[in-house]
Image: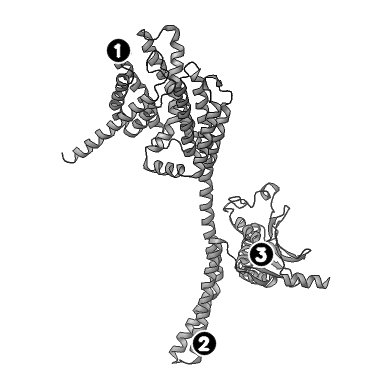
Amino acid sequence: MSQLQPHLLSRVASYSAFVGLYLLFDWATYIDPMYGLNITPWNPDPALGLIFWLMHGRRAALPWLLAILAGEWLVRGLPAGLPLTLLCSLWLVIGYGAIGEALRRRFPSGDIFDNRRRLAIWAFIVVAGTLFNALVYISLLSFSGRIPPGDWASAVLRFGIGDMVGLIVSMPLIWMLASSSGRERLRATIWRWETLAYLALAIFVLWCVFGSIARSEFKHFYFLFLPVIWAATRQGLYGTALMVFVLQLGIITLVKWSHAINIEFYELQMLDAVLALVGFFIGIVVDEMRKVADELKHTLRLAAAGEMAAALAHELNQPLTALSTYGKACEYLLERGESGAMLKGAIGHMIVESSRAAEVVRRLRDFFRTGAMQLETLEIGVLIANISRQFAPQFHQHDIELTVSDGAPLLVNADRLQIELVLRNLLANAYDAVQGLPRGQRRVTLSVAALDGGRLRLSVQDSGPGVSGSVAARLFEPFVSSKASGLGLGLVLSRAIIEAHGGKLWAEVGTCGLFRFMLPLAAAEVRGNNGKQ
């Protein structure tokens, strides 16, 4: 019993708060009523009720009925009488509850506004539900004689549009305010200078468009798209929800303040509903694009980690092998009782190799984290020879002929580890391209040539099927690969490395595979070539 009491008190407090807020919404938006009834051009209070239903299910029915009856009594003074008011209120709870149940069944996880498809389904349920609700509600009032038969259609239109616009404009913002994560994100959206700027623009546009609302005839309504599109493109759905609610609130305030009751207000509300839906769709598209971009960044970080691991495996192989050799030498010397210069020399070599391994790890980590480079003057022929020796056993095992064309010594200023990583990627791609060919036709060639303008061109050519024009146009985009098992990320990273060195990497279309990259020659090499000319 002692455990149930706090839970019961919490529920009573929640229901009481809902009824109070519902009454406040009802009072604030009770504008231009038809025959003094609850038929107004804007009804945001059902949006509050639907959110409450989504959170509590059918337990929300009784508090919602009490809130509607309290509004009829305190705000309107029971203009239809108690029996008819009770009957109509019961129907409203049933009709709104049906919309709430449809939303709960369609969105069991509670994610309503996270993509365009869900938004379209939500809008359809809201529009269809409110129109059917209005038909029955107005028909009950009409059968009782509270609404003349000739005004039935206009009453349905006014009540249906009022509910529909109130739900479309207000429900997303109330939904965000109903959860702690939504409130936190909304708070982060509001407290920005840009938010204040587009809110100020919205107020200014409202004043320009509706400065004299009774005579405006909505001729310049399209100017309201400016702040909505600004909010949607910069801050997604959360900025849009805030903006369309502020615009709706501003329009209602202007109408109430100017007592402009003779205008076709439901036309203005329809325009506002269309404005809200357009803004929501733009905002959701922006959110989806940002989500995809974040996922892409995460995937690229994982790919970079994989490339880093492969580079580390190659680069650490030699120092680790040397450390093992020197370690065994130390064991041998200690067994012999050696403690002099030979043992000290072996230990010194171990320290040097361990420092080399640590330097490899540090440089690769800095590159994959920040893109930092450690430039040194390198002879490209020596670099190619080192990489070729690493691939030679693998190529020999699969009968792949690897040819390295001799050329004049050419110097470049580059980060050795990064350029070796690019060469490994290109050779690995060439290996995959020729592996399926018959024996005797598997060939890979590396060649270097000096170009005019102080540049060199390195080519990796294979006897594989080559790259088609359609694939070549997108080959350096993430997740585009000609290999069935490839992720299409190695070439993206390779191009980033080459471009960071001031060069260019590309694939040539043809009947065989051909990848090339250019790099600037070192300054000394350029001066030497100019002197020879």
Residue 455 placed where, x, y %?
Answer: 74, 64
Q: Are marks 1 and 2 in contact (CB under 8 Å)?
A: no
Q: Residue 400 bears which disc, if any?
A: 3
User: Label 1, label 3: how many angstroms apart (C-alpha)?
Assistant: 94 Å
- In the orientation shown, which residue stands out farthest toward the right? 533
Residue 31 drawn above or below residue 146: below
The amino acid type of the residue labelled 1 equals: Gly
Which element carries disc 2, helix, strand or loop? helix
Which element carries disc 1, helix, strand or loop? loop
Residue 175 placed where, x, y %?
Answer: 40, 35
Question: Which of disc 2 and disc 3 is earlier in sequence?
Answer: 2
Residue receiving disc 2: 345
Residue receiving disc 1: 81
Q: Nearer the viewer, residue 191 or 100?
A: 191
Residue at 52%, 29% in the rendered image? 206
Which of the 4 image quarters holds residue 370? bottom right
Residue at 55%, 19% in the rendered image? 215
The amino acid type of the residue labelled 3 equals: Ile
Q: Is residue 16 left or right of residue 368?
A: left
Residue 449 drawn above or below residue 233: below
User: Label 1, label 2: how many angstroms apart (C-alpha)?
Assistant: 106 Å
Other-residue count near label 2 (Cα within 10 Å), few / some / many at <14 / 14–19 / ≥20? few
Disc nearest the viewer among 1 and 3: 1
The amino acid type of the residue labelled 2 equals: Gly
Which element carries disc 3, helix, strand or loop? loop
Residue 355 placed where, x, y %?
Answer: 52, 76
Location of the N terminus by quadrant is: top left
Q: Nearer the viewer, residue 22 or 281?
A: 22
